[in-house]
Amino acid sequence: MIITKTPFRMSFFGGGTDMPAFYNEHGGAVLSTTFDKYCYVNVRHLPRFFDYSTELSYAKTERVTDLEQIQHPAIREAMRMLDMREIRLTYEADLPARTGLGTSSSFAVGMLSAFHSLKGEFAGKRRLADEAIYLERELCREAGGVQDQIAAAFGGLNRIDFSAQGYEVTPVIISPERKERLNDSLMLFFTGFSRFSSDIQESTQRSIGDKTAQLMEMYRLVDEAQKVMEDNEADLDDFGRLLDHTWKLKRQTGSRISTDSIDALYQKAVAAGALGGKLLGAGGGGFLLFYVRKERRESVRAALHGLMEVPFRFENGGTRVLYYVPESYPLTKEEEGA
């Protein structure tokens, strides 16, 4: 039996520049962090006592006798890619899916890690990130960027640079005290809305050619925000002001990024004292993140009293195997003869 634990991520700056259509020509970068909310994937071989050969439990339960019968595209294609057979897979998570936190990519990374472990193979963080990108973007044909898979695999507060040659992950050099202050200045609220990221991303990708100026400015803000984070003499509140700037730019990159309801919530938070913020993920719903000075936190909380606040702390570990017990699993006569 294998149990993996994979964090979710929040992306601060550069979202949209991680799409190949943009970074292959212009380069790209994001500033993001993983935090202490996770998904858990439990995988083991299914004992041969049942009239089905694979059992999957996520938002629904599937029991099938053939790989092609699996409805969940990521599980089906991952099992095909790594030649997985006769398994029981269970997925659980601390936060709901389709909320802008890279949940599907965290699941993909954690699932691939569990599959490799069940086969007795070691898979490093880069391999898991690369395979998750290939799984979601190529095999499942889901539109979107490539930052989520990398963040989930590597973990931590990082700058991720993209180019036609690949990507590089560089930890942000920030003092523990300043990092703690940044964490304490961020507030996360659930809007109650959820959507399929790939639907929003597909619409956004079609308009990339028309939004190059906005994306280039969002790319530039990655450098500026990184300097604010790493320079102990800089005003950390500028991080919040830059969030406001990048959110306004992001809203211009697609008609489905925001809604009237989300805009109204954002304005309520700013009027109550938030220096800036953004909707996490592709847009359309999910979680709102705000930068708020300590003395204004209660005011922002009161202004958004109808929303659930989710306390969080940054994390550094990335995906990991929590439990590993190899299984001795006899081959069938057909497998022995293969």
Image (spheres, rainbow, N blue to C red):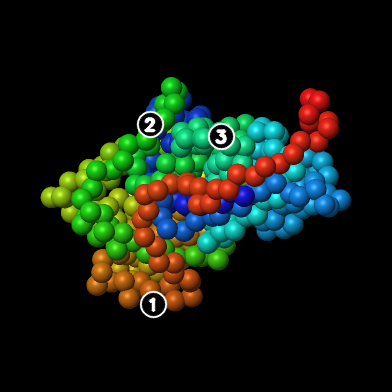
Seen in the picture, residue 20 relative to 263 is either above or below; the reply is above
Side of 307 relative to 48 (left or right): left
Q: What residue occupies the far top of the structure in this picture?
A: 165
Side of 256 relative to 12 (left or right): right
The mark tally for this picture is 3
Q: Which mark is residue 121?
A: 3
Amino acid type of the residue that numbered disc 2 sits on in the rendered structure:
Glu
Side of 24 relative to 178 (left or right): right
Q: Residue at x 52, y 35 (%)?
A: 122
Q: Which residue is mark 2?
A: 168
Task: Tell me if mark 1 has few (under 14), some (14-19) or many (20+) residues whose alpha carbon lies within 10 angstroms of its own.
Answer: few
Seen in the picture, residue 272 relative to 46 is either above or below; the reply is below
Disc 2 is placed on an element classified as strand
Q: Which residue is mark 1?
A: 302
Q: Which mark is residue 90?
A: none
- The residue closer to the viewer here, 239 or 217, is 239
Amino acid type of the residue that numbered disc 1 sits on in the rendered structure:
Ala
Q: CA distance from mark 1 to mark 2?
A: 41 Å
